[in-house]
Image (cartoon, rainbow, N blue to C red):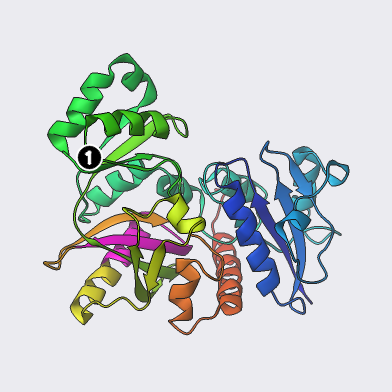
Amino acid sequence: MKTKLGLLYGGKSAEHSVSMQTALAVINALDFEKFEIHPVYITEQGQWVKGALLNGPVETVKQLEFSEGESVAPTALAPTLQTKGEKGSFDVIFPLLHGPNGEDGTVQGLLELLNLPYVGNGVLSSSAGMDKVIMKNIFAQAGLSQVNYSWFIRSDWERDSDTAYETVEKKLGYPCFVKPANLGSSVGISKCRNRKELEVAFQEAFQFDRKVIVEEGITAREVEIGVLGNDNPECSVAGEIVPKVDFYDYKAKYEDGNTALIIPAEITEQEYAMLKEMAVKAFKALDCSGLVRADFFLTKDGKAYINEVNTMPGFTPFSMFPLLWKHTDVDYPSLIERLVNLALERHEEKQKIKYTF
């Protein structure tokens, strides 16, 4: 029998369009002989729209943006998700969602309540991995090396912005990077070289979140590793990002192609071993499952600093995570199937938990 796979994509997030591209790529890579594919589109306003069963590849993103006539209220959709075995129910869910309201533990919490297997990280690891401040605090507790950082809440900044700027200048200096704490895909990130740029960067970042993080800028290579698994994670080869612009922002990632990806990265065996050890340590510190992409800074003198992990990394065939696994002899369709199997494995493990006394 085919596996009934529900794909959640779109979402009420600044990364809506990134999710749409991911969904298109995954659908076209799936084996329709193995999977019965049920698309569920979440609009930018947060409306859930269940599409018709897909019988073959899809040509454009527009075909995945369903009309209001096919929409269902989330309350009507939930029983469909929950009643396993009945017509229209799913065997496993693949949340192809990036950013808040999807990658941050909210959808994962819904799926936990519905007792459905789902691909990727659970509630805790998703929420902790989404919030860069919480994530970095956990990494610090785990003893992972990081660059210096500070964080600020919008209300405190609005009340006394000068103190925030002075804190950054005293603790971190220039250059530094200002980021929304709960957003990915390099949305809202600015590099600052002086007070004027810092003021503009805070205003930009606070458009996307109530909390921002500011990180010390260092001269280093940006190296990434893919991690795959549950209790016994495996690592891919390492890859290096070489931006042709000043830094790896949203435009360089998704629009103008001003980035070179070097896979495998030209690093020593000792450096690779060190990064693998750190990647697995970070994976376990956040209690991750399924997949993460671990991002590092590697200096000329061989020091490594973990930057972050992404619990739902870019997932088109041309994104770093799938490319890393392609160079580790796991092609894109096989990668998707492994993630589905890991989701089922984790769900089966959860069923062993005793909830009554």
In this view, which residue lies farthest toward the bottom?
329
Give amino acid for label 1. Answer: Arg
In the rendered image, the vertical position of residue 29 relative to residue 140, given as above or below: below
Question: The residue tagged with tag 1: helix, strand or loop?
Answer: loop
Which residues fall within the magenta stretch? Answer: 278-298
Residue at 76% in and 71% down: 57
Please state if 3 lies on the left or on the right of 279 as rendered: right
Please state if 186 lies on the left or on the right of 68 as rendered: left
Asked whether residue 49 is in view, the answer is yes
Report the residue marked by disc 1: 193
Residue 129 pos. (x, y %): 41, 49
Asked whether residue 117 is in view, the answer is no
Label 1 Cα crowd, 10 Å radius (few <14 / some 14-19 / many 20+):
some
187 and 132: which one is in front?
A: 187
Residue 151 pos. (x, y %): 29, 34
Residue 61 picture quarter: bottom right
124 and 182: which one is in front?
A: 182
Residue at 47% in and 50% down: 126
260 and 343: which one is in front?
A: 260
Residue 2 pos. (x, y %): 77, 74
Residue 173 picture quarter: top left
